[in-house]
Each structure stands twice: as C-alpha cells, then as structure tokens.
Image (cartoon, grey):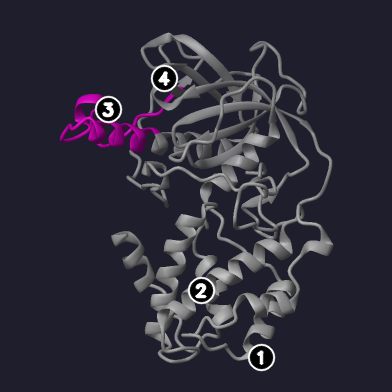
C-alpha cells in the first residue's frame, strides 16, 4: 500500500474531467483481473481525485469511488466480445446503476451520459507491461521450447545471424539464418519460419511481426557460456559461443553480416553478462563481483585463425545498467482472459518484437 500511495502522489488530476482522469490513471498501470485488487485501486484513485478536485463532482470520496468502479464494469460490459450485443449495458441501465450514489442523491445525468458515450466510443486501455512484450514473443515461437513468461525477464536485443555449419565454405546469404533473442538472463536461438502480415506499430524499435513464427532451436543461460569473436577466410565476422567452464567446448558458432552487427551483439551481451553476475553476487550477499568476474570490466577475445597463437584484445565496457529493473521484481502478472477478468482490455496483445534489422 505504501508503494501505491507514493505512486498516486506522482499523478496530478487537477482540472481533469472524471472520465479523462480515470483513463489517465489506468493507462499508467496494468489493471489486475480480480475485483478485490481493482477495489483498492479505485479507492486510491477516488482519494487522489478528490484531493486534486475538491467538490468537483461530489463532496464525498465514496461517491467518486463508486462511480469509478461502475465505469470499470461498464468498460467490461461494452467491450468484452464474449458478451452478446443484446445483453450489453445501455445508457438507462448505467444511469440506474448509479442512482443515489451521492449520499442518497443522484449525480447530474449529463455527466453520466457523457461518461457512457465516451466509454462506448473509445475503450479504456490499460497500460502495457514488459510481460505483454514477452508474451507476444513467446506465442510467436513454435516447437519444443522453454516458457519466456517470467516476471524478471526482459528482451535486450533481437538480431539476425547465420549459423556456421561448415567453416570451410561460405553459406549463401539466406541460408542457415537464425533469429537470435538476447534477454537479460538467456540467449535464445530460433529460425524464422513464415511471415503472414504487415506491421501495425509506428515504433521503429518494436516492429510487429504478429504474423511471424519462429522455430525454437536452442537456448543458453547467460552464466553458462562465453562469447568470442573470430575471423576466417569465409567467416570474417564470426561469433563463437563456448562453455563458461570449458573453453574447448564450443556450443555454437555464428556469423554476423558485418562488423557493426557483430560489435553490437557482443557489446550488448557483455553488458548483460556483467549486470547478471553483479546482481547474482548481490543476491547471495557478496560485497562485490570481483570474486566471480574479476575487475569491473569484461574481456571480449578476438582470435585470428591465421595466427598460431591468435590475437587477444581486451575491451573495457562501461557499466551501463538496464533501462529498467523490472526483471528484479518478484511480482507476478494476473491472468486477464475475457472470461475470468472483471476488466477487459481491447487492443492489447499483438505480437510486437524488436526489429530484426539491426
């Protein structure tokens, strides 16, 4: 509750009409499915709305609370496709439901009519969270796979690389292409199977590939492998994935299409590894990360196969932490199926994934 109180202090509803204020509030969070949790949120909303707009609609906080909860029910009734058209709430029913909620008095009918028409015309959209994004990726991957739906997981980057099947020959540009997803705790390797539609988002970094499917190939947890760059005659931008505890155990070899792609992938992987290990050491109560990963830098090893000993280059990487620390949270997402949820959200759940053209 303390977190909710601090959260509400950051939102200013001053001079906002009731419906607009409620929309603004709900857009800031993922509204849960259980009525008990919604009840707590509506209480917090009512208290804050009354603080910002004393006497605007009513002198009592309870009136705002009941009206807000009534609007949530209206939203569900009007925009849940499982409710048949002839059973959806009409204006008179909505007005009747809110009769006498202001200390026995009725609210202005014009206010209720405006709210009804507004919600009917445009559904109230709950805020997206990182698990919406993970769910869209998870649904796009077919075949035997692990579940990506863990609250601490975040996608850091997505890119296309080629798997090296034969070191002694150069594969055609469109052969052995792998779509690689790098999360904050694992590396997922897939093969793109098909494309059946167009993107619907304007966000350049999150192209919708709702129509794209990917075949699961393999995955590696961040702590289980190291990445090394290498170059051969046929694969000048090679990336070698080796076992963390056995440098001679090669898990996978990939090839980028250019040096920029390879550097971007290795740098992102290095930062993911550094932060993951730092957090893990912090979790088990250590004072620092020096015992496990040495200095506050991470070495990427570049090998020239034409050299007997190879050349090793060490790059010092900055400590850029992730933009979000959501993956550290222990909170779980509630199921929001139309049949079990009091609040139904329209327009959320399309398969957005990061643009593969990196």
Mark-to-mark CA distance, 4 and 1: 63 Å
In the rendered image, which residue does mark 3 sit on? 293
Bounds of the magenta segment: 273-302
Q: Position of residue 344 (x, y in %)?
A: 64, 57
Camera-near label (4 vs 3) is 4
Mark-to-mark CA distance, 2 and 4: 53 Å
Q: Is residue 301 magenta?
A: yes
Camera-near label (2 vs 4) is 2
Mark-to-mark CA distance, 2 and 1: 17 Å
In the rendered image, which residue does mark 2 sit on? 66
In the rendered image, which residue does mark 1 sit on? 110
- Answer whether labels 2 and 1 touch (C-beta < 8 Å): no
| Figure quadrant of residue 99 | bottom right
Secondary element under disc 2, as helix, strand or loop, is helix
Can you see residue 230? no
Q: Earlier in the sequence, mark 2 or mark 4?
A: 2
In the rendered image, which residue does mark 4 sit on? 224
> Which residue is painted at 76% across and 23% down in the image?
175
- Number of residues whose C-alpha sits closer than 10 Å to that of mark 3, classed few (under 14), some (14–19) or many (20 or more): some
Secondary element under disc 3, as helix, strand or loop, is helix
């Amino acid at each position: 509750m303390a977190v909710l109180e601090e959260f509400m202090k950051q939102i200013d509803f001053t001079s906002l009409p009731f419906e607009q204020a409620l929309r603004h509030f709900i857009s800031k969070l993922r509204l849960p499915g259980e009525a008990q949790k919604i009840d707590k949120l509506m209480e917090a909303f009512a208290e804050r709305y009354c603080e910002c707009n004393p006497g605007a609609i009513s002198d009592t906080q309870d009136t705002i609370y009941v009206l807000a909860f009534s609007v949530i029910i209206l939203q569900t009734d009007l925009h849940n496709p499982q409710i048949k058209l002839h059973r959806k709430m009409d204006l008179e029913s909505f007005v009747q439901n809110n009769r006498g909620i202001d200390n026995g008095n009725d609210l202005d009918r014009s206010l209720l009519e405006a709210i009804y028409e507004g919600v009917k015309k445009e559904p109230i959209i709950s805020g997206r969270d990182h698990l919406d994004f993970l769910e869209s990726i998870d649904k796009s991957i077919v075949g035997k796979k692990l579940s990506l739906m863990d609250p601490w997981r975040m996608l850091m980057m997505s890119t296309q690389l080629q798997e090296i099947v034969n070191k002694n020959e150069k594969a055609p540009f469109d052969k052995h292409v792998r779509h690689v997803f790098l999360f904050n705790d694992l590396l997922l390797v897939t093969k793109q199977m098909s494309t059946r539609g167009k993107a619907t988002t304007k966000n350049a970094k999150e192209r919708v590939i709702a129509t794209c499917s990917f075949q699961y190939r393999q995955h590696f947890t961040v702590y289980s492998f190291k990445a090394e760059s290498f170059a051969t005659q046929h694969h000048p931008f090679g990336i070698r994935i080796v076992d963390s505890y056995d440098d001679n155990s090669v898990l996978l070899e990939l090839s980028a299409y250019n040096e920029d792609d390879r550097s971007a992938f290795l740098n992102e992987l290095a930062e993911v590894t550094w932060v993951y290990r730092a957090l893990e050491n912090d979790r088990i109560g250590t004072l620092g990360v020096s015992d496990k990963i040495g200095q506050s830098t991470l070495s990427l090893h570049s090998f020239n196969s034409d050299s007997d000993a190879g050349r090793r280059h060490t790059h010092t990487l900055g400590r850029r932490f992730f933009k979000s620390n959501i993956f550290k949270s222990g909170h779980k997402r509630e199921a929001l199926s139309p049949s079990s949820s009091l609040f139904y959200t329209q327009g959320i759940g399309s398969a957005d994934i990061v643009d593969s053209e990196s």
